[in-house]
Image (tube, grey):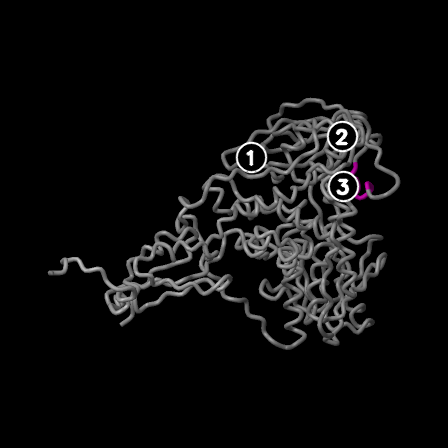
Amino acid sequence: MQKPFAITLDVGSSLANKTGSWRTERPVYVDRLPPCNAQCPAGEDIQGWLFHAESGDYEQAWRHLTRENPFPAIMGRVCYHTCEGACNRGKLDQAVGINSVEHFLGDEALKRGWAFEPPAQESGKHVLIVGAGPSGMSAAYHLRRLGHRVTVKEAGPLMGGMMRFGIPKYRLPRDVLDAEMQRIVAMGVQVELNAKVARIEDEMKAGRFDAAFLAVGAHIAKRAFIPAKDSSRILDAVAVLRSMEGEDKPMLGRRVVVYGGGNTAFDVARTAKRLGATEAVIVYRRNREKMPAHDFECEEALAEGVMVKWLSTIKQAGEGALTIEKMKLDDKGNPQPTGEFETLEADSLVLALGQDVDLSLLEGVPGLQVKDGVVQVDPKTMMTGYPGLFAGGDMVPADRNVTVAVGHGKKAARQIDAWLRDVALEPAPKHPLATFERLNPWYYSDAPKTMRPQLDAGRRSSSFDEVQGSLTEENALFEARRCLSCGNCFECDNCYGVCPDNAVIKLGPGNRFRFNLDYCKGCGVCASECPCGAIEMVPESI
């Protein structure tokens, strides 16, 4: 009997034909930098902690997050989450709610009492930090983790800096702020309150500090010349927000006008509504597109009844009224006067025109350079021109927000540690960016973003209760699982399943895969079907 032409091969007989010699290209697994990680000013490994969160291991997610940033509960409330603007998922449906998951993790840690581990060993070095705000306490945390003794001197009566005296309670509840500050103190950080440093050079010598980090916040309000009668009531935004922390709340009256277009202007106007003002009006000399405040701040303020007069400037302050001149933008976008005036009734005028830093403690320090009201530092090391003296946050040229300040504190702490050990700290090389074009979005199902609950507008304007709520555990888990894991293998088994040569070998959970190049023909199916763009085809070397 003749055998059929098509012979069924024995199991394993195809292994005899090593087709790897056919290829001209071969696949390699790569790691790429997720755009959210690349965007974060605090340097968080966002994709890394989201991976643990989507597995339901919230404590591990929190510990992974706090390797870089010790304030997840604070940041989940006040960070402007530019990471979400860079998120690749935003091109698919909506960006992952990174900030909302961070908010949940921060609150979960406070609820469950998770604490930071003390350093394994002491270095014997002593570092002075001036200012207990976001930058100073971030630096204190990272320096303490590295084993250094840390003393923080704060001029004010409480920790938190501008997070306490510049951010209203409805955005950042004080129990949350205090809890995350105290968790750092519990690591062995010494904090001295009401301890203003008059001269930093004398303080370093008197305390025999090995290095110092300057993290003084911008507490001094900028002024503008506005002709005013003696009876007119003019205040500055910083003083108004600061007085909210005391027993005596500011008396602003029923009709409050705020001059400025930044986030602080909206904070003051919203605070005025909560203090009982029937009218809170923001006067800004440009239009909405040009305002420095974030758009969501404007939207929330408008929902609470705050009014905005765009393209307007204040020319004179009188008794119970302001003279407003209408403006127009020229071809370059700069406001120009029109000669048209109107009267706006006001019991008080609050100036929200920016802040400066008190640099008097730097008097007499050799080698220090100050330009445009800020200290010049080496952008790589954060060190000033005086050896061993570092600076960050509002004191240096940079955007002024909590996230940037926290990142400065971490960076300075690591550079201070390197300086104390007399070594050069070289930044780790970065992977190439994981762009949307490298993803295979067909594999990801539609999953609309979960929105955090908000206090209704009626209750907002009558109390200082927190406006932004937190996700539930179920919602936080869902939101974390919306992450696309851009540019990094998450072991979905796609490559393993589509390889026609069985050339992909599984290495076990957490260990990813490897290619058996004896059998890989270099067809590229694995690379084209990888959802997250973690496989690249490279020319075969001979």
Which segment is the magenta one? 235-244
Q: Which mark is on residue 273?
A: 2
Mark closer to the observer (1, 2): 2
x, y percent for residue 400: 65, 50
Q: Are the two marked residues, 2 and 3, in contact with CB atoms closer than 8 angstroms?
A: no
Q: Main secondary structure of the magenta part?
A: helix
Amino acid at dot 1: Glu
Amino acid at dot 2: Lys
Between the C-alphas of marks 3 and 1, the distance is 28 Å
**Which type of secondary structure does the marked residue at label 1 adopt?**
helix
Q: Earlier in the sequence, mark 3 or mark 1?
A: 3
Amino acid at dot 3: Lys
Q: Determine which residue is flagged by label 3.
A: 169
Between residues 274 and 382, which one lies in front from this camera angle? 274
Q: Residue at position x 70%, y 59% from top?
A: 138
Q: Determine which residue is flagged by label 1.
A: 289
Q: Residue at position x 79%, y 74% from top?
A: 208
